Amino acid sequence: MKKTYIYISSLFCLMLLAGCDPLDKANLAALSSEDVLTNPKVAEAYVNDMYANFMPSSFSVGRLTDETMVINGEYAAGLSDYLKGTLTSDTYNDFPYENIRKINIFLAQVDNATFDENVKKSLKGEALFWRAFAYFRMVKAYGGVELILKPEAPANKDAIFVPRSKTSECIAQIVKDLDEAITLAEPLSTIGRIDKGAAMSFKGRVLLYWASPQFNRTNDPARWTAAYQASKDALAFLDANGKGLYANYKDLWTDEMNKEVIMVKRFQYPGFSNGYSQAGMRPLLYSRGAVGDNVPSLELVNAYPMKDGSKYDPAKMDYRTLFKDRDKRFYASIAYNGADPYLAEMFGKENMWTYYYDADGNAATGINGKEARADNSENLYSHSSFYPAKMLDRNITRTTVEDGQVDWIEIRYAEVLMNMAEAANEIGKASEALVAMYKIRSRAGIEPGAKANYGIAAATLPEIRKAIMDERLVEFAFEGQRFWDLRRWRIYSSTFNSFKDKYFHGLRVEWNGTAADRPKGIVDINSIASKFTITETRDYQPIVMLDEDKYSFFGIPKAILDRSSKIEQNKSWGGTFDPLQ
């Protein structure tokens, strides 16, 4: 079956395309001015292409962080270059100037369009948003880049091969585009298009990064104030328009377009799929192809707090009962040995089982969470003993495992709230930061406790900062935030260097009974937890980190440098460009 990727407004984009003879779908940049200026359907389809080019769906970015461990073998290549000391200036290559040029073409024409003024305004706002989004994608990786704001002809080398602009100049242009997008975009979209709320929320994200240590080495309070105000304004707008925290964290992704969703990449199947293959994240019995890839690390599992808000202490806890009394996000995100059924094919049939050997020394073949080969010749299971449960399409089957329909939520209300809290703390508004944290934890089912602080004992600015960092890890696990958070906080290298023995860890779960009485089907894990032996294990490959500066700003790839002598390499990669200016 041929798969076609579908983006934000794809259904009505298809309806538009069916009646748009002048639209050259193979090369939207080749549209004539007359096409775009006179036909709103053509103009709208042109903007839809921007969604296709830029809307993220970072389902696998966790493998670059402490959230997941990746097996080595037939189905995966082990640690990434970022975590095994082989990161080079060619590793990260993301310069979407061809698609930025398409946006510039549209922006140069749209003011002269003859169709409805409101349609023209909203489409221009969306285009400005995507230009800001594209430039920020580069800036957060490299620092300042070449600012090209007009549709220069590719043959005009002097116009397209320009020096890198200062990072501050790029941020100023990004904010300028977003401010204009905010004034032009529709207030709220019910079908997933970029609207005012999304533009305001994204502006808050941009300014939070700009205020963070990655860019703000002097801790300039003016940057934090700007970040705080941007997210504060976004929250006020979202609140006034019915947005807020969705009550059930577990169903946040399956109850699509709920009130927490701010910016989303929409998918549907049959006919279209999000391309989010769940094969590597589901047990073999419910999957095909790669299995045991991108599975939760023990480091992430240990990060989830208890339901009273206190930290889980692995030194004092028994790993056989690690599932007891955790907050609701743990159960919504982590499938562990004995976990309740979390896939439709398991409902009413069996728990999640990830134990390996029984007391008789027999391999636990036929157990849904372990490999199906008694000789253990292939890595067809989770080496951490955990599987991700969050954001999965519960209803697809083994035969349709690559055709998930779950939307990718790029921005949700909780992020805007946490962004505001982080900036508030940095400018002395600790109480406001804590109240925001209490809201997040309350939704997670954490008890307020006698002090009504939801287990947050932090009181000083550094303590609250650390509490926010820890909260973001579990609140946004697998959502593509962690990689960029670690970089903007400048703790990417130090986080992994602090791992015990500099390895990722998991658990080996063994059944102490016989093969005949080992658990299958639906069993209360509490009644048999004592019959398991749980041993901490480590990944096969050690972590090797480079200096923090190598991760704060990636090197410019050689292919980019070779195109123009005007492009400078970043200082941390042997060049002369200062990304902090």
Image (tube, rainbow, N blue to C red):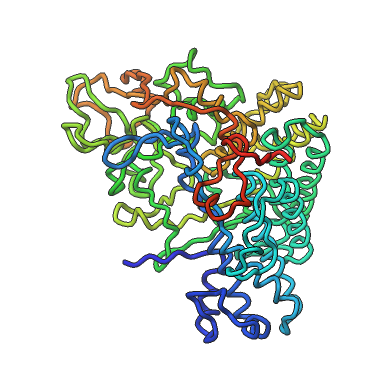
Task: Pinpoint residue 462: horizontal percent, then vertical percent.
Answer: 72, 23
Q: Give the answer, above or below, for where 471 lies relative to 481.
A: above
Q: Nearer the viewer, residue 477 or 515?
A: 477
Classify 545 as above or below 55. Answer: above
Residue 357 image-quadrant placement: top left
- Quarter of the image with the C terminus is top right
Q: Residue furthest front?
A: 565
Which residue is at 66% across, 64% downward? Answer: 159
User: x, y (%) of residue 91?
Assistant: 47, 43
Q: Residue at x 40, y 39 (%)?
A: 294
**Residue in the foreground of this view, choosing between 11 and 99:** 99
Q: Residue at x 18, y 21 (%)?
A: 361
For residue 200, above or below residue 472: below
Tell me residue 473's x, y (percent). 57, 34
- Number of marks: 0
Q: Quadrant of the N terminus?
A: bottom left
Task: Classify residue 161 by image quadrant.
Answer: bottom right
Relative horizontal placement of residue 125, taking residue 475 as reference (left or right): right
The reply to whether residue 255 is in sight is: no
For this rendering, which residue is in front, 96 or 425?
Answer: 96
Residue for point 64% across, 32% down: 489
In the image, 134 versus 536, the foreground residue is: 134
